[in-house]
Image: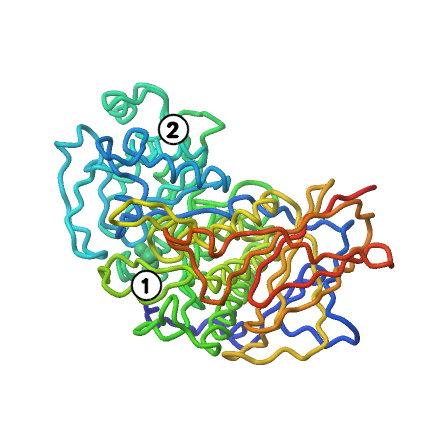
């Protein structure tokens, strides 16, 4: 995950390095708003909807890593855990309740070691391989293409398949998309039928390698950009089915490597006019993880000081800065926003839980993780015009998971992060509303950036609006006035998520130590369109508003 040194000599990138984070007028509060007299306020113009927040910003990621696929999703038909064709029923039910819009697979770093033909056909005949990145263990390929697409159908979600550039061939990638999506009697469609699947699947998203600057081949930006063009060319839309077209996602930058994004943007054709599709790839990814310490000692998931709490939340806020700055590079080449930005790995990365395999990246998930997620989503909503997808890493038992399963009993626990996804589900495909946060105090500087104690965002579906509010203050409650303008508010309901401490988390013994409850502390003020809300310390809340005409 370390970012290799790169040539930052280009003019655009040097200029960007000197700028502070930009916020688009009318769509963002951004950190560092000027202090205001009077109570803390969140001002929202309900009648000025902006960009649509794609549901794909609430996407997920499942890699062959630790206990994510095996034990997490897939336990096999013979398991005592209730399953459908080997896939855990309780995990499917929990994720269906979140309406997860897409699932990325098989990696991550694993993707550039993965040869898809090893994962089809009778399971007992599938070749084995070494999962060299994650624990150096033997992978038996029992979960392959058919099992993944079965999972996608059980989840009622959409597939984001990540291909292999680092150690795979162009032909291999080309055949995989043919195998997955072709309807006629082509060689790969016929092979799929021999393996028991008649109808083609839909694969709307396809990744052209992963982290090509590191585990995906240690490439230079220009070298990878050339390969991304070549490989993308052969990830063809198959057989003329207009409903089965693929968005090709080039493997993007880590953190603030804007030169990487710029090299990829230089590789895209057809950006001049408004008409026609960008190509050969239509989107570019980026990755950024939040930790409280350095890479070598990222910090404990559950034992942290107040200083680490604030440092972590400040680093979570950095994600929005990075999205803004990668977007600025993209704007320069692509003013019509034909190329999407895909933030396909984000979330917390802590030291593994004591006693667990260091290669399995198993970590607990506390109220702090919940606030990291809510801060990310606030930033995502503000950049919905460029950001077309985001995928938290990872869905089950790895990094900032939604679900943890007990290795002995198999018991399933929903994490605080899961509840943020659930409470925010109403933002999916809604239109962003600017939420201006005005605080009475100057925000403190934490880890090199101003960190206001309130983070907020909002969206509307027309008849309703959803407001997300995070109180970053580790110790104090915060009272806010929601100043709701432009439409009458005819009703409201609110939920809050917090725990007894900022490190509270759920376990099989205490599965609801951190779970949403009704937020009763919402008062209608005399002045029409104003609600007063008190948020407990270290909490996340959502207020759903019914709107009149
Ligand atoms: O999510 C874990 C790993 O982090 C992924 O495999 C890789 O892409 C990134 O470095």
For residue 172, side relative to residue 478 (left or right): left
Element assignment for label 1: loop
- How many callouts does the rendering have? 2
Contact between marks 2 and 1 (CB within 8 A): the answer is: no
Is residue 179 shown to the viewer in this render?
A: yes
User: Horizontal and vertical percent for residue 100?
Assistant: 48, 41
Q: Which mark is residue 345?
A: none
Disc 1 crowd, CA 10 A, few/some/many (<14, 14-19, 20+): some
The yes-or-no answer for disc 2 within 8 Å of ligand 1 is no
Q: Quadrant of residue 260?
A: bottom left
Q: Is residue 372 above or below residue 421?
A: below
Q: Which mark is residue 220?
A: 1
Residue at 57 percent of width and 69 percent of height: 472
The residue to which callout 2 is attached is 201
The yes-or-no answer for disc 1 within 8 Å of ligand 1 is no
Q: Name the quadrant where ligand 1 sits.
A: bottom left
User: Horizontal and vertical percent for residue 411?
Assistant: 33, 45
For residue 274, side relative to residue 510 (left or right): right
Which-is-in-front pick, marks 2 and 1? 2
For residue 39, side relative to residue 327 (left or right): right
Name the quadrant of the N terminus. bottom left
User: Horizontal and vertical percent for residue 449?
Assistant: 55, 77
Residue at 36 percent of width and 26 percent of height: 182
């Amino acid at each position: 995950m370390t970012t290799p040194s790169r040539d930052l000599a280009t003019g655009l990138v040097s200029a960007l390095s000197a700028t502070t984070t930009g916020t688009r007028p009318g769509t963002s509060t951004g950190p560092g708003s000027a202090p205001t007299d009077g109570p803390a306020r969140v001002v929202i113009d309900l009648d000025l909807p902006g960009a649509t927040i794609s549901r794909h910003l609430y996407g997920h990621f499942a890699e062959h890593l630790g206990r994510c696929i095996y034990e997490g999703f897939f336990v096999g038909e013979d398991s005592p855990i209730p399953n459908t064709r080997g896939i855990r029923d309780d995990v499917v039910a929990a994720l269906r309740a979140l309406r997860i819009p897409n699932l990325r697979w098989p990696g991550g770093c694993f993707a550039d070691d993965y040869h898809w033909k090893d994962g089809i056909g009778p399971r007992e005949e599938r070749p084995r391989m070494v999962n060299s990145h994650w624990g150096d263990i033997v992978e038996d390929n029992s979960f392959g293409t058919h099992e993944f697409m079965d999972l996608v159908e059980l989840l009622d979600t959409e597939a984001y398949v990540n291909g292999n550039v680092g150690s795979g061939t162009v032909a291999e990638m080309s055949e995989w998309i043919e195998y997955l999506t072709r309807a006629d009697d082509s060689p790969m469609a016929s092979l799929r039928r021999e393996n028991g699947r008649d109808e083609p699947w839909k694969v709307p998203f396809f990744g052209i390698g992963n982290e090509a600057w590191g585990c995906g081949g240690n490439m230079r930006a220009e070298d990878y950009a050339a390969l991304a063009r070549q490989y993308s060319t052969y990830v063809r839309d198959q057989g003329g089915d207009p409903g089965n077209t693929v968005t090709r996602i080039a493997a993007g930058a880590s953190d603030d490597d804007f030169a990487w994004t710029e090299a990829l943007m230089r590789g895209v054709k057809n950006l001049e006019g408004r008409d026609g599709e960008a190509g050969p790839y239509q989107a570019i990814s980026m990755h950024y993880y939040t930790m409280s310490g350095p890479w070598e000692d990222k910090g404990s998931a559950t034992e942290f000081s107040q200083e680490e709490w604030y440092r972590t939340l400040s680093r979570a806020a950095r994600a929005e800065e990075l999205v803004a700055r990668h977007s600025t590079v993209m704007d320069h080449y692509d003013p019509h926003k034909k190329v999407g930005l895909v933030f396909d790995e984000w979330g917390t990365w802590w030291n593994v839980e004591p006693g667990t395999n260091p290669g399995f990246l198993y970590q607990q998930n506390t109220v702090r993780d919940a606030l990291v997620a809510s801060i990310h989503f606030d930033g995502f909503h503000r950049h919905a015009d460029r950001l077309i997808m985001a995928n938290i890493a990872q869905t089950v038992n790895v990094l900032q998971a939604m679900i943890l399963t007990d290795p002995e009993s198999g018991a399933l626990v929903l994490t605080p992060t899961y509840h943020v996804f659930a409470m925010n589900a109403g933002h999916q495909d809604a239109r962003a509303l600017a939420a201006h946060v005005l605080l009475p105090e100057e925000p403190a500087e934490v880890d090199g950036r101003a960190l206001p104690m309130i983070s907020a965002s909002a969206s509307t579906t027309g008849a309703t609006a959803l407001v997300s509010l995070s109180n970053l203050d580790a110790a104090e409650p915060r009272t806010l006035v929601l100043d709701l303008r432009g439409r009458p508010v005819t009703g409201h309901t609110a939920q809050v998520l917090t725990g007894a401490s900022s490190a509270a988390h759920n376990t099989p013994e205490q599965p609801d130590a951190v779970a949403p409850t009704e937020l009763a502390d919402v008062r209608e003020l005399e002045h029409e369109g104003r609600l007063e809300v008190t948020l407990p310390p270290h909490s996340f809340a959502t207020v759903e508003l019914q709107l009149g005409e």
